[in-house]
Image (cartoon, rainbow, N blue to C red):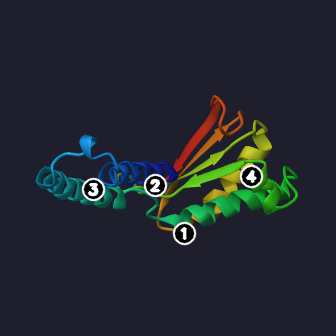
Amino acid sequence: MRQTDVLLCALFAQSLRSYFCAKNTQSKPPLRKALCIKEDMKNYLSLICLSLLGCGDIDRDSAVAYAEAATVSLIEKGICASREECSKNGYIFWEGASLLGDKVHINLYKTDDAEVISAVQEAIFSARSERDAGVILTVYSSEHGTKRVRLFQGTWE
């Protein structure tokens, strides 16, 4: 599950909890009505949680393998000295395949050097031969979290 989905569920649960635990009896509905609302909310909450189970990363292992291959190529090209430095500086972000798609996403940031992009492409392509999931590589010259300036997007089935 994505972090935003977890936060939304937690916020929804907190609001339900505060509603049913309110100390002011004037703001609370009659008990019979509250119990009906509580049952309805329980059904809705169950439905929301079940629908969120389908979200998220299906092929996490492939995404991690592709990201690792890309990180190794960045280290070999001298962009960063270690995996930790690559991670800390926000060069690579990944997302597993979703239910709607069968490809994992690898996003490379702060890169506009053609040699580096080519090396990352080759690393992902060679890692692709060992995996079932397709991969989409997107390269941005901008930093993660800023307005995206996309330079390249490649897909391997």
Q: What element carries label 4?
A: helix
Q: Is 66 on the left-hand or right-hand side of 81?
A: left
Mark 1: few/some/many CA within 10 Å (<14, 14-19, 20+):
some
Is 32 in front, or is 143? 32
Q: What element carries label 3?
A: helix
Give the alpha-carbon distance from disc 3 to disc 1, as whole Å.
30 Å
Ranked by sequence position, the earlier of labels 2 and 1 is 2
Q: Check residue 119 in the rendering and tell me which mark sits there, or answer none.
A: 4
Give the alpha-carbon distance from disc 4 to disc 2, as whole Å.
36 Å
28 shown above or below 86: above
Mark 2: few/some/many CA within 10 Å (<14, 14-19, 20+):
few
Give the alpha-carbon distance from disc 3 to disc 2, as whole Å.
13 Å
| Closer to the eye: label 4 or 2 | 2
| Closer to the eye: label 3 or 1 | 3
Q: Is 102 on the left-hand or right-hand side of 86?
A: left
Q: Which amino acid does label 1 sit on?
A: Asp
Q: What element carries label 2?
A: helix
Residue receiving disc 1 = 61
* Residue 157 in view here: no
Q: Check residue 6 in the rendering and tell me which mark sits there, or answer none.
A: 2
Residue receiving disc 3 = 45
Mark 4: few/some/many CA within 10 Å (<14, 14-19, 20+):
some
